[in-house]
């Protein structure tokens, strides 16, 4: 026990003596009972107090054998608090009400609902996509899971506007819940968790996607939920290291990492919605390996790099297998049919499938994927609302899902539009927030910075390498939760930690609260063009802040 703890105390490879990385502050003061404020405003300053931190109680005397520096690096940032779920539910309720009101407006299928809502209905009837116009199997280039989600709504509520949009509402509200809990876990504050949830609630981009039967809201939700499971797994595994060292063991006993398995399942669901989740799959596997090495180094392992790499790579392989199993399972309707598009590709090429029926089916699926990939890489048709990745964070080219100039607003000219446009004040904060997070990550050696920055870029940067391919603003959907986490991280730094003076914390709270309030006002101003409300043409044009770039 003594040698293990000594090694763990001396081994500071993942945290300098001045800025311990990911280490929650410890003081002799107990937690405050305020359910919103889970750090003590009067706590004495420590190294980590320069970051967003939480104050915890000093461990009992019988646990003091474990060096405090080791405990700080391994202990999760924030304890469980059932009251925090009340605030999470309140944020979710606001998100749900906003998204449900007027859900059936506009009438009819708008934008790509003509494809996805229609495909969802054909899945219910055939188990695979069907081309009603030609009365034949349809060739579609996106996996089926997102359309199955839409189909559930149609099955429960009917093949109408509410039926094909309700699943998107559920996914959008679920994403709000996930980011609220994730931000609370990462930043050690229920206040910051609720701030992140409110920012997503008030983001016009997520709001419009959550009210439209497109695939991207499901992609967004599955990706952020998968990441949240990975962060929970990180906390759980490090807590098990603390328990093992306190019990005199060199390392924790093997246990199945259910949070990690859950992350793999959700990532498989993301891939089964859109292939663009593949970039996050690569990043999440790297995170597993890096966090495994970091935990072992903090726990005092003799060879943390070697042991961590071996364990991390083994788990990465398991993670990949689970992810791909879920992905293939999403094609069950196609695999179990005889009439789906290219279902018997081998037979059409004069090859026998009878000798290897299951392998033959998978080979047919592989050929289908090759054809879909050829479509994606060759898609260069021009579109009035296409845009390039460098424009997305600047809101240079939002996407009009619906527009009508029908009369009825009481003026000579009227407008009704559903415009996929992020709340401008929020989205124009993303680039400064990312730069701020990079600074905090470097200056404080804060582990939280790098997955946030990576997630914020992975939904955007890879598209830069696809040349002239037709692209749209909503391709950035899986990055949106990470960009909101970046803003929340910076807001937490502005508010300050428990070591800051009362004046500093008061001013910081006013600034952060004022920012969230301004985002809410901005969202309210653009609300008519998020929901297709009929307004005068003059009112509509007043909201086109970038002129023809938004028309």
Image (tube, rainbow, N blue to C red):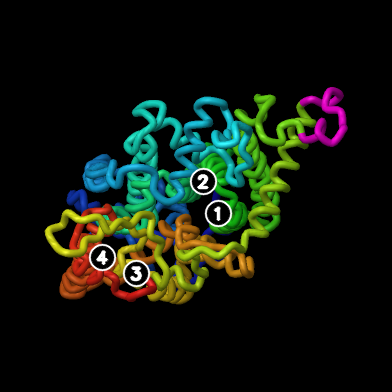
Gap between marks 4 and 1 measured at Cα: 26 Å
Q: Residue at x 36, y 28 (%)?
A: 158
Q: Which residue is mark 4?
A: 498
Number of the label disc, if any, that sits on residue 237: 2
Residue 37's x, y, as percent? 22, 55
Q: Residue at x 81, y 33 (%)?
A: 348
Instruction: Look at the numbered disc 1 and give the secondary structure of its residue.
Output: helix
Q: Is residue 431 above or below residue 181?
A: below
In-front residue for pair 124/185? 124
Determine whether, in the image, residue 466 is placed left or right of residue 345: left
Gap between marks 3 and 4 measured at Cα: 16 Å
**Residue lying furthest left in this view?**
410
Determine whether, in the image, residue 282 is placed left or right of residue 18: right
Gap between marks 4 and 2 measured at Cα: 27 Å
Tell me which numbered mark, 1 or 2, is placed earlier along the sequence. Answer: 2
In-front residue for pair 502/480? 480
Q: Which residue is mark 1?
A: 295
Instruction: Look at the numbered disc 3 and give the secondary structure of its residue.
Output: helix
Number of the label disc, if any, that sits on residue 490: 3
């Amino acid at each position: 026990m003594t040698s293990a703890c000594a090694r763990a105390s001396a081994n500071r490879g993942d945290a300098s003596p001045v800025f311990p990385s990911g280490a929650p502050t410890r003081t002799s003061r107990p937690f405050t009972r305020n359910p919103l404020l889970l750090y003590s405003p009067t706590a004495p300053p420590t190294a980590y107090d320069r970051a967003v931190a939480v104050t915890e109680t000093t461990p009992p005397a019988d646990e003091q054998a474990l060096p405090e520096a080791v405990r700080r690096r391994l202990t999760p940032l924030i304890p469980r608090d059932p009251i925090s779920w009340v605030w999470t539910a309140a944020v979710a309720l606001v998100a749900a009400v906003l998204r449900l009101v007027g859900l059936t407006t506009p009438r009819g299928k708008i934008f790509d609902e003509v494809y996805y809502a229609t495909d969802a209905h054909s899945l219910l009837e055939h188990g695979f996509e069907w081309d009603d116009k030609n009365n034949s199997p349809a060739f579609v280039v996106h996996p089926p899971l997102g359309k199955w989600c839409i189909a559930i709504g149609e099955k429960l509520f009917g093949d109408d506007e509410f039926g094909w949009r309700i699943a998107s509402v559920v996914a959008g509200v679920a994403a709000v819940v996930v980011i609220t809990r994730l931000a609370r876990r990462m930043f050690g504050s229920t206040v910051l968790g609720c701030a992140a949830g409110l920012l997503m609630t008030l983001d016009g981009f997520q709001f419009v996607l959550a009210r439209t039967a497109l695939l991207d809201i499901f992609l967004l939700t599955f990706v952020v939920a998968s990441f949240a499971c990975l962060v929970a797994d990180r906390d759980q595994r490090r807590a098990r290291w603390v328990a093992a060292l306190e019990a005199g063991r060199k390392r924790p006993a093997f246990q199945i990492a259910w949070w990690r398995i859950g992350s793999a399942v959700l990532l498989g669901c993301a891939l089964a919605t859109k292939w663009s989740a593949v970039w996050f799959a690569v990043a999440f596997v790297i995170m597993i390996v890096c966090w495994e090495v970091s935990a072992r180094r903090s726990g005092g392992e003799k060879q943390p790099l070697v042991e961590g790499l071996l364990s991390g790579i083994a788990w990465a392989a398991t993670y990949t297998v689970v992810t791909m199993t879920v992905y293939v399972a999403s094609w069950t309707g196609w695999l179990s049919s005889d009439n789906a598009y290219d279902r018997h590709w081998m037979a059409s090429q004069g090859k026998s499938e009878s000798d290897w029926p299951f392998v033959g089916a998978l080979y047919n699926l592989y050929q289908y994927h090759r054809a879909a990939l050829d479509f994606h890489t060759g898609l260069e048709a021009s579109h009035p609302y296409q845009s390039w990745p460098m424009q997305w964070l600047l809101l240079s080219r939002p996407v009009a899902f619906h527009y009508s100039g029908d009369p009825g607003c009481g003026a000579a000219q009227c407008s009704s539009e559903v415009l996929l446009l992020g709340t401008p004040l929020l989205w124009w904060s993303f680039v400064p927030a990312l730069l701020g997070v990079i600074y905090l990550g470097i200056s404080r050696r804060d582990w939280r910075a790098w997955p946030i920055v990576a997630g914020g870029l992975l939904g955007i940067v890879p598209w830069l390498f696809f040349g002239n391919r037709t692209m749209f603003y909503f391709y950035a959907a899986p990055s949106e939760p990470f960009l909101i986490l970046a803003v929340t991280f910076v807001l937490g730094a502005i508010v300050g930690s428990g070591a800051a003076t009362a004046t500093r914390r008061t001013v910081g709270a006013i600034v952060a609260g004022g920012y969230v309030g301004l985002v809410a006002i901005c969202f309210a101003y653009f609300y008519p063009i998020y929901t297709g409300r009929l307004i005068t043409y003059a009112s509509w044009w007043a909201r086109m802040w970038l002129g023809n770039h938004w028309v």
